[in-house]
Amino acid sequence: METRLEFRDLTLDVEFDYQPEEKDVSYLSNGDPGSPGCAESFEVTKITCGKIDMTEFFMEYDDASQIFIALEKAFIEKFREDCNERADY
């Protein structure tokens, strides 16, 4: 998946993998066994600014974990907004 995000004074194009939460299902309506759920997960795979690949810069930055936490929150919010907008059509 891809999204564009404003981060400080930069416009970043970010590629990421997102898996929404799936609830446990004990049994299907026909009585068959269900499936275990999974937690929501998010992983940034690439960050570019224009044609410049900034992925390594963010990975090596001293506060990388804080940056990725902030980016993760922003992406998940934007992704949920995008999904809700699509559902309104």
Image (cartoon, rainbow, N blue to C red):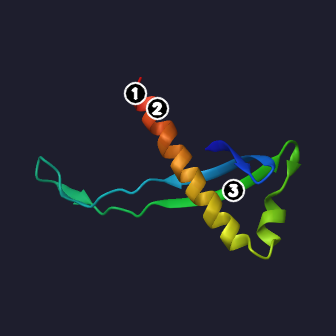
Q: Is residue 70 left or right of residue 84?
A: right
SS at badge 3: strand
Read off the residue under disc 3.
45
SS at badge 2: helix
Read off the residue under disc 1.
88
Q: Tell me the residue at 46%/32% (across/down).
A: 85
Q: Are marks 2 and 3 in contact (CB under 8 Å)?
A: no
> Disc number at residue 55?
none
| Residue closest to the far top | 89
Instruction: Give the mark, 1 or 3, whose residue is nearer the N terminus.
Output: 3
Q: Tell me the residue at 47%/45% (across/down).
A: 80
Q: Is residue 52 above or below residue 24?
A: above
Crowding near the residue tagged with mark 3, few <14, some 14–19, many ≥20 C-alpha atoms within 10 Å: few
Q: Are marks 1 and 2 in contact (CB under 8 Å)?
A: yes
- Mark 2 or 3, closer to the camera: 2
Amino acid, disc 1 = Asp
The span from disc 2 to disc 3 (Cα, nearest Å) is 25 Å
Crowding near the residue tagged with mark 2, few <14, some 14–19, many ≥20 C-alpha atoms within 10 Å: few
Read off the residue under disc 2.
85
Q: Is residue 8 visible?
A: yes
Q: Is residue 21 left or right of residue 60?
A: left
Amino acid, disc 3 = Thr
Q: Is residue 33 left or right of residue 11?
A: left
Amino acid, disc 2 = Glu
Q: Indicate the position of residue 58 as horizontal and vertical percent values.
A: 78, 64
